[in-house]
Amino acid sequence: MNRITLYNSMTRTKEVFAPITPGQVKMYVCGPTVYDSCHIGHARSVIVFDVIYRYLTAVGYKVTYVRNFTDVDDKIINRSHELGLSPESLAKKYIDEFHHDMDGLNVLRPTLEPLATEHIPHIIAIIEILVDKGYAYAADGDVFFSVTAFEGYGRLSGRNLSDMEAGARIEVDPRKKNPFDFVLWKSAKPNEPSWDSPWGRGRPGWHIECSAMSKDYLGASFDIHGGGKDLIFPHHENEIAQSEAAFGQTFVKYWVHNGFVNINHEKMSKSLGNFLMIKDIVKEYHPEVIRLFLLSHHYRSPVDFTDQALRNTGAGLDKIYALLERLEKYLGGLLDKNTEISVPPAGERDFLALFYDAMNDDFNTAQAIGVLFDAVRHLNRRLDHAEKSASEATPENPEPLVEIQTACGAILKMGDILGLLTLSPQGYFNSKKERAMDRQAVDAAEIDAMIAQRQAARKAKDFGQADAIRDQLKEMNIEIEDRPDGTIWRVIS
RNA sequence: GGCGGCAUAGCCAAGUGGUAAGGCAACGGCCUGCAAAGCCGCUAUUCUCCAGUUCGAAUCUGGAUGCCGCCUCCA
């Protein structure tokens, strides 16, 4: 099994990854609160952990991956009142939308996707343990966690309570013993979803659901807990306090947090009104372009989403698919991604091994994608060469063919781990055309007719006329390419 | 006020002690009727600045400057 290192937010160092149970990985990632559509920031987090999940699986771990939905919460309640929907149906609507968006981005479904509302009895049981052990106290139907009772509160976020008190500038509930005490159970107001509890009717606070669901599916102690950087405080800090106070074990071995997405150098925020929703972005850019763009940055670094950057990424993805198309012709069909990949002959670079090296180093997808492009250039070079000296690929001299197949298999395997290159080249270019035609109202039949006209002119050696047609197409944002077997066209993005 | 991060070519981005991956863009060449695509070459004697440690620093230490995030719901 590969030696993987990963950055642990708790220790702030890269550590060698060694799961609690050898060969098995238990990971929990905080999913969305389902009160609105998903934005590009959700996409990043979900895609980052999707790739981690895919990679760990690819190197042989049996991974149990849990990603929850928060389906009871103030924001959901407020929004449902605004829209005149029940909180349940609002949550359902956005869970469906989340699935639709993420499926569209090639995100695999986790092993389990539990809902907070399905775990109320267990949540109550944990709160009771915390009250019994003296970590929590009830006040008028609410229950609070007492942060001073838990030694080590603030360890993950690097804060200590006395420092924070100086900076506290929110209105403090007078019933709290400490301003940083947080609510485990909230008493119900009229018209709110609620459940019976020892403290009266109410609903869980935000943090406790993750302690309950992770315990249910992964146990009191598990390997990887992930989420966006912003969740470090207070959410994950509070989860640690609850779970470790209740169960007396180290909650999580490795904490993994992804960085944020900025839009045109600005933070996404409600006040700036620059939230980019996934459902809108996919109208502009191919889903695999979005994935490739996000994965071209290290997961902990911030990412700046700009049109220019996405267009550049699109050019890169085109290049990879163009190679696949070339390979398909050359090999007479693409290799299946599951094909056994042989080790490259001596003297050939083992791109897949280099790719794994990059991924083993804290899931460095940016570097791994560098390897992918190296492999693309290498294969293009080989194909240039092979096409010039056709004898190379004959049955009498099959060596180059094996090398090309191996490198091709490696590229598809890399794509599989990154959740890219899932389409046939034709499928990819066609979907791009369709997307562009919807937007720019170009007519395929008209373009084909113009290309036919140009071919006729070329045949008649009327190159002036041929070039004029090409210029005309260019003005329509259509670029053409003359190939030995005919002329193809694409929309310039 | 507290905690943390970042600064690498025209742009994006890897690289955490051994002499600067990769992508996009530009330019020159091969190829082509001309293009496009692809390939080759070229593009940072140098990594914000200053000082230090070291045989050796983009990488470590100290300082300066600039930008950013968290501390309130937030991926």
Image (spheres, helix red, strand yellow):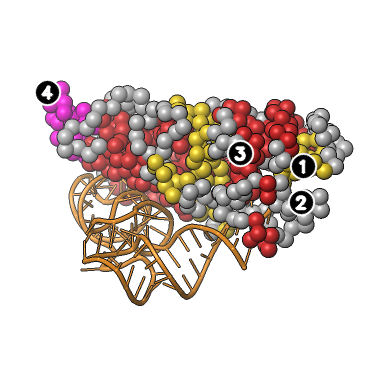
Q: Relative to A344, does residue A491 appear above or below in the rendering? A: below
* Separation of residues labelled 4 and 3 (CA atoms): 67 Å
- Residue pictured at 57% horizontal, 36% vertical: A249
Same subunit, labels 4 and 1: the answer reads: yes
Same subunit, labels 3 and 1: the answer reads: yes
The residue indicated by pointer 4 is A396
Same subunit, labels 2 and 4: the answer reads: yes
The quadrant of the rendering that contains the N terminus of chain A is top left
Identify residue type, mark 3: Glu
Mark 4 surroundings within 10 Å by alpha-carbon count, few (fewer than 14), some (14 through 19), many (20 or more): few
The residue indicated by pointer 2 is A177
- Residue pictured at 31% horizontal, 33% vertical: A410
Was residue A215 drawn as part of the magenta stretch in this picture?
A: no
Q: Label 1's element?
A: strand
Same subunit, labels 2 and 3: the answer reads: yes
Residue situated in front as seen by the camera: A482 or B53? B53
* Separation of residues labelled 3 and 1 (CA atoms): 17 Å
Identify residue type, mark 1: Tyr
Same subunit, labels 4 and 3: the answer reads: yes
The region drawn magenta spans A384-404
The residue indicated by pointer 1 is A137
Q: Earlier in the sequence, mark 4 or mark 3?
A: 3
Dot 3: chain letter: A
Q: Is residue A32 left or right of residue A201?
A: left
Magenta span dominant secondary structure: helix
The residue indicated by pointer 3 is A244
| Camera-side mark, 4 or 1 | 1
